[in-house]
Each structure stands twice: as C-alpha cells, then as structure tokens.
Amino acid sequence: MGCPGAPAGKRYGGERGPRRARPESHAGPRRLCDGRQRSLGAKAGPSSYRGPPGGRGGLFDAIKGALELGISWFTVYAFSTENWRRPPDEVRFLLSVISDQLLLRRRDELNRMGVQIRFIGRRDWRVPRRVLHRMDESVAMTRHNRKMTFTVAFNYGGRAEVIDAVKSLVNEGVPARKIDERALRSRLYSPDMPDPDLVIRTSGEFRLSNFMIWEVAYSELVFTDVLWPDFRKEHLAEAVREFQRRDRRFGGTRAGSSDLG
C-alpha cells in the first residue's frame, strides 16, 4: 500500500521505519499513512503478567514510538472485566502498575509530551477509590492536550460496553425504530474515539479477548509473539509496516475483482 508524498519514518534498529503521516485534527478514522487520522489499539496477552519490573518501561516506550509515528489515538487494554478472576496477587500487581507506575510516575511526563489521558470501562465497586482518584486526576491534568489521545481500557469488556450502551437506550426510552448504529455508537464509553485502524495482539495469542468488539469490525489485525512487557517501539514500527502493506476495502472490492472480503 503506497503513500505518495508521505515523509520517511525514523529508523528503528538500523532499518527504515514506517512513513510518518502529517498530524491533523481529529476528523475520524483514516489510514495510518495517509496524513490524516490514525487510531491504534493494543491488546496484551494473559501471559504478560510478571513481577514489578515487567510492563512499565515497555508501555512508555511504545507510547513514545506512537508519537514519533504520528499516531493520534493509542489505546491499550490494561485490565479487563474478566481480570478480576485472576489470583489476588496478580490483580494487586496490575492495579499498582496502573495506579502507581503509570498514573503517578508517568502522567507528568505524558502531560509534557502533549498526551491526553483517557479511560474507558466500568467504574464500579470493584475499582479501589485511590485508583479512581488518580484516574480522575490524570484526565483533568491532560484534558487540553492534543498531540495524542492515550486511552486506557480499564475494567473494560467489549460485551459489557455494548450492554451498557443498550441499557442507556432503554433507560432513555428510545423507541426501537430509532435505534441504529449511530444511536448505539453515541452511547459507547468514548463516542468520539475513532474506530481502530490497527489492532496489535501480543503474546502469541490469536484472539481479541473481548477487546472493543463493536469498534474493531474493520480494523486490521496484527499478531506478534512478543510478550506485552517486552513490546517496544521497534515492534510497534514493525506492526505499522505490516499495516501499510494491507489493502483496506471496508467490504468493497479491488479494482477489477469480484472478491467481497
């Protein structure tokens, strides 16, 4: 997939990186390399849990890589609604990584980098108050930043998101004849977020694990054996290069082809 006129990307490990698109305003989802809106989601595999050294530096390195590539929306699946079933020690570790390592130690730096921090997911009784407090502080601190929107899917499930959107429609008394894709989408957790152009699944898994199941209908999927704690910007660049080779048709056809894939 060519991108005429797009400037060359930075080199990663001596290899030329993917082309970097010119930044523009949030106008909706577009290809990563066409100079318009770019949106990316990353799903960590269940084997990505480690002790305290794991995950923290890798995530921040990936965020910096996304900024270098001109990606405007970067979403990570940090903690799912199903993760509460994991062993208590693992749950406590994951919560501490989100609360202490990301929101407390990194938010000032992300703010200086022009990154807006957001969260999607349920705010229910299971989420500790200190975590909710730091989430709210981070959102307020970075709300005016526009260089990139970094969204953390926390206590999130794709099915739960759709269920909550349907409940909103019912509670608002919306008649069935007025319920369509636009009505449901407007009641998702972050309605203004563009659908991901690219979803990266780490840890050698070949499933989405309930990640943004409404939004990824036409996303390109890239799978990697790299564990999430080891994922760095060079791996992100490799995934984007793969994305740039894809032919995205959104249900249409190639010129002169009858393929409806």
Image (spheres, helix red, strand yellow):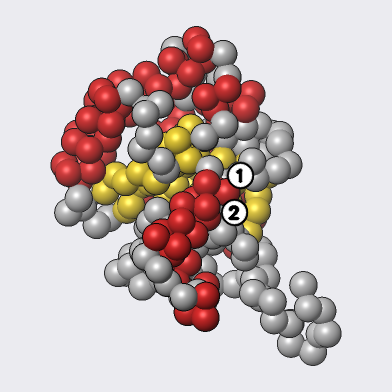
Residue bearing the label numbered 1 = 210
**From mark 2 to mark 1, how far is it between C-alphas?**
6 Å
Identified at 66% across, 63% down, the residue is 245
Residue 27 picture location, percent across and down: 36, 73
Residue 164 picture location, percent across and down: 46, 52
**Quarter of the view holding residue 153:** top left
Q: Are discs 2 and 1 less than 8 Å apart at CB?
A: yes
**Residue 104 visible from this viewpoint:** yes
Identified at 51% across, 68% down, the residue is 31
Task: Report crowding for label 1: few under 14, some 14 to 19, many 20 or more residues within 10 A (C-alpha).
Answer: some
Identified at 62% across, 27% down, the residue is 46
Report the disc number at residue 3: none
Where is 20 relative to 77, above or below? below
Quarter in which the N terminus is drawn: bottom right
The amino acid type of the residue labelled 1 equals Asn
Identified at 74% across, 82% down, the residue is 254
The amino acid type of the residue labelled 2 equals Ile
Quarter in which the C terminus is drawn: bottom right
**Quarter of the view holding residue 225:** top right
In front of the other: 33 or 82? 82
**In this rendering, would 203 be left or right of 44?**
right
Residue 65 picture location, percent across and down: 42, 44
In front of the other: 71 or 131? 131
- Find numbered disc 1 in the image and state the secondary structure of the residue it sits on: loop
**Direction bottom: furthest residue:** 256
Residue bearing the label numbered 2 = 213
**Quarter of the view holding residue 260:** bottom right
Where is 170 relative to 144, above or below? below
